Image (spheres, rainbow, N blue to C red):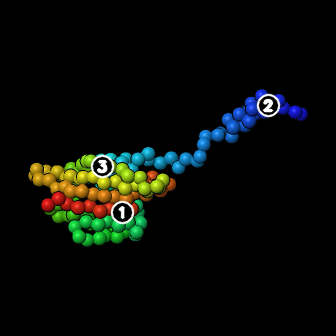
Amino acid sequence: MRLSPHDRHAFLLAGCLVAGCQGPPQPPAVAPSPLLVLQAQEAAWNRGDLDAFMSLGYWRSPELCFFSGGSARRGYEEVLARYRASYQGEGREMGRLSFSEAEVLPVGLDHALVRGRWNLRFNDGTEAGGLFTVLLRRFPDGWRIVHDHTSASG
């Protein structure tokens, strides 16, 4: 059977529609922005849920890095222990966390650098805050922080 040019064009168009011609493959559907990780962490922190703060944001790996106050912590469990000691230890409180001035800088398809400011407001009216830079990596289940460098103001 011989097809006319018009029939060949219609046949190719139909084939594309059936095959789903949609251009190049897209990355897996996960959280559309690393900023959503920070928003989820902020909400978890402000309801006093440190476990959710960690699991929603940080890579659960011994290779996780957290640099702050002149010291380096490595590994999910060590970072969690640092947060517990600093904010849930005897006489401590978590305060109310807010992130601001967050800026996302893509570093390829599966990594992003986010930098901004953090602030904690405590019940007695005092505040703490500073700057942060986090490197996030896109995993099949979403974005996770793989490196966190946080500094405190003066």
Q: Amino acid at mark 3?
A: Ala
At a point 64% along the width and 40% down the height, the residue shown is: 21
Q: Residues within 10 Å of mark 1 (few under 14, many from 20)?
A: many
Name the mark nearer the viewer: 2 or 3: 2
- Disc 1 marks which residue? 147
Q: CA distance from mark 2 to mark 3?
A: 55 Å
Viewer-closest of 52 and 64: 64
Q: Amino acid at mark 1?
A: His
Name the mark nearer the viewer: 3 or 1: 3
At a point 31% along the width and 65% down the height, the residue shown is: 66
Q: What secondary structure is marked by label 3? A: strand
Q: Where is the N terminus found, in terms of image quarters?
A: top right
Query: Could you tell which of marks 2 and 3 lies nearer the N-terminus?
Result: 2
Viewer-closest of 44 and 68: 68
Q: With respect to residue 74, does 128 lie above or below?
A: above
Horizontally, residue 142 falls left or right of residue 80, namely: right
Query: Could you tell which of marks 3 and 1 lies nearer the N-terminus?
Result: 3
- Disc 3 marks which residue? 102
- Disc 2 marks which residue? 5
Spot occupied by residue 33 in the image (x, y as percentages of width and height): 41, 47
Q: Amino acid at mark 2?
A: Pro
CB contact under 8 Å: marks 2 and 3: no
